[in-house]
Structure formats: structure tokens, C-alpha cells
Amino acid sequence: MIIARTITMALAATLGLLAGKAPQDQEGGLSWPREFTHEGYLVVIYQPQLEAFEGDRLTGRTAVSVVPPDESEPVFGAVWFDAIVETDREERTVAIEAVTIPRVRFPDATEGQSQALADVISKRATAWEAVVSLDRILTSLEMVERERAVSDDINTEPPEIRVTYVPSILVTLDGEPVLHDIENTDLQAVVNTPFTIIYDPSTAVYYLYAGQDAWFYATAVMGPWSVTDRAPEKVTALVPADTVQAEVDEEDATGNDFDIRDVHVVVVTEPTELIISDGPPEYASINGTELLYVSNSESDVFVEINSQQYYIVLTGRWYTSSSLDGPWSFIASDSLPTDFAKIPPESARGSVLSYVAGTDQAKDAVLDNSIPQTSAVKRDGTLEVTYDGDPDFEPIEGTEMAYAVNTAAQVL
């Protein structure tokens, strides 16, 4: 109820401020972001993102942040609007005549609270008057179309998908290993990986630090790797206490503890995903569907009984295959078998509903994606980036950006 009151008061104040002529910049556009206080609430309205302009209707959304009284952290949300406008093509202006708020989205707000907020905003929005530049609106819409074109052109080529039946760690290299001499030693480091891999030329042995004082060794960087308790001191001394270790869950797919020294090391040089199960796959049914899922794995792997086809979702994208061993191919979420939309939300695999087109969970995920995500960054923080020679950048396909290929850091 406190959250509802916070949001209601803040957004009512927001629309109250917008009533009447809104502040504009010298180019005839509204100035953003707009910040004000009302009864102790600090409200910031960010620049709206337009979605469509057809006839006399202008639609879009805007992010809003609210800091309640006696608190320091903002609550972020999003407001969708539908405006009736009058366009003056000679003056190149657009006058906003009426506004309705079809949707409000704030974290932790119930459907009833969100509807109450939408009602409050709609009532206050009837007095929202503003004149904005037509050219600025058209420019914004052009940017929206470009973003949609980019999203439609996203590479859907599946990564390499490997299946393993034992606890494993995935060690990624950006291409073939690149070795760099370590100053004041006779050792070398593999620099095109975020993992700590040291090479000793005198013995032609690679050493991988997996964390918790666990070391693995191999005579080839691609493996096979074996655990060792006898890594040379000149190697172990190179790893400071705050070194990032290889990511591995200390529990297997069924929640059982295991020793990190027992893991299987998988080294790859291209985008790869691991499907890890605790032994051969075990299958369980999903009530109300013709679907099975792999119950002894944390990966979301399914089998449709009728077609005997496998499905897996990785970072929100679906892939399908007639075998766990592949080959896998991309499948759009709106092309999945209809039973995926019937998965009970409370079931063991209910979380995948966010990635199934047309479900309420997928719609909510789209709305939540419109809400800004923030993180605290230390302004006085520093970062030292080490390159293998001069910085070497390669273009990122489909963008105007490039990334550094001869450093373990992610530099764009």
C-alpha cells in the first residue's frame, strides 16, 4: 500500500506539473529530463520514447523515477501514453490536445494498483498542453524505425551447444590462444580470455586457476585438463587474492555438493553453451501438456512427445533439434508448439513463459524492459587494461562499433 501511495502521489504530481504550458528549449521542444518535488517526493520524468504517429494520434512511453520522502533510492517505472494532437505543417509544430494513459508499469505494483495509477494519471492528463516541434517528432520516429530494423536483423545463428553429464566449467577464448610475456618472469599468459591461464614454456604446460586454490594443467590449451596439487610456486604466486575465478556452481544440477577439483574443463574458441545434467538426462512431464523436461539439469531443455523434438531456451532465444547432440536451429517464440503456452506458471519450468510469445509473462517482460535498470558506479574507480601490443580493434558486424581483440577486458 505504501508503494501504491508513493507512486500515485508522485505521478499525480507529475501530471499536475504537466498541466498548462510545459517548459521548452530554444528549438521548440520540451526540455528533458524534468525534475520537481511534490509533498516530499522527488520526481524525474525522462524524455518520452515515441512509438507511432498516425493521423491525429501520437503514442509512446516515458520513464519515471520517484524518490519517496526520507529515502535515497529511486523507484523506476514506465508510463505509456496515447495523445490526440493537431499538426500545423506550415509552422512545423504539433499541439497536444488530449492525453490518455492506457498502461502504467512499476515494480511490485499489483494489477489493481497499476490500474489505479493509470486512472489518476488519465484524469490529470486531460489538462496536459504542449506544443512541440514536428521535425523533432519525425526525427525521433526515424530513430525508432532504425532500432526496429536492427532488432529484426539480429543474428539468430545458434551457438555451439554441448551436452555434458558431469559438473563442468566453460572456459572461453576469443579465437586461438594469444600468449603474452609476463614481466619479470619466464612465463606467459593467455590474454584473450577472462580466465587465468598461465603457460610455462620450460615445461610446455598450461595452468588454469579455477578458484578455491584449485589448479588444472594441460599440455594443450584445448585440453584435456587434469587437476593438480603441484602447480609451480612461480605460477601460483601470480594469482592475487581478488582474481576472478572460473565460474562454477558448487552444486550440481540436483543441488548436491561437489568438489571443484572434480569438474570437467571445457575450453572453446567460439560462442558456446553448456547443457549440464547430473548423469544421463532424466525426464519429467509437465501437467496439462504433451511436454517433458530434463529434470536433472538446470538448463531449460524440453521434449515434445508428439514430434520427439527437443527445445532449449538460451538467453531468451529458442532452439530446436531432433537430438540433444544437435544440430540445433533457431525457432521464433511464436512458432513454438502451442503446449509451451500451457506450462503452469507455478511448475518447475514456469519461468520460461517469459520467452513464449503471447503469454502474460512475455507481455510483462516486454513492459519491464521499458523500465530503466540502474547500478551504482564509483566515480573515483580506475581500471588498468593490458593489451598484447598496441590495441587492436575489430568491427562488430551490423554496428558502427568495434571491440578490442587483444585484451582480456571488454573494451568497445
Image: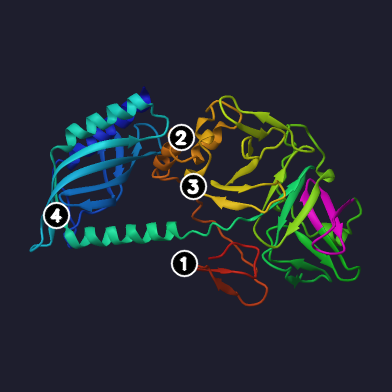
Mark 2, residue position: 361
Tell me the element at label 2.
helix
Mark 4, residue position: 94
Q: Which mark is residue 399?
A: 1
Q: CA distance from mark 3 to mark 2?
A: 28 Å
Q: Position of residue 234 (x, y in %)?
A: 86, 62
Work out whether residue 73 can be spotted.
no
Q: Residue furthest top?
A: 1
Tell me the quarter of the picture where residue 263 sits.
top right
**Residue type indicated by callout 2:** Gln
Q: Residues within 10 Å of mark 2 (few under 14, many from 20)?
A: some
Marks 4 and 1: in contact by CB < 8 Å? no
Q: Position of residue 194 (x, y in %)?
A: 68, 59
* Way the structure is coloured: rainbow
Q: Residues within 10 Å of mark 3 (few under 14, many from 20)?
A: few
**Residue type indicated by callout 1:** Thr
- Viewer-nearest of discs 3 and 1: 1
- Viewer-nearest of discs 4 and 2: 2
Q: Is residue 206 magenta?
A: no
Q: Which mark is residue 124?
A: none
Magenta stretch in the rendered image: 208-228
Q: Position of residue 338 (x, y in %)?
A: 50, 36
Marks 1 and 3: in contact by CB < 8 Å? no
Q: Residues within 10 Å of mark 1 (few under 14, many from 20)?
A: few
Q: Residue furthest front?
A: 306
Mark 3, residue position: 376
Residue drawn at point x = 14 percent, y = 54 percent:
94
- For the N terminus, the quadrant is top left
**Residue 274 falls left or right of residue 158:** right
Tell me the element at label 4.
strand
- Viewer-nearest of discs 3 and 2: 2
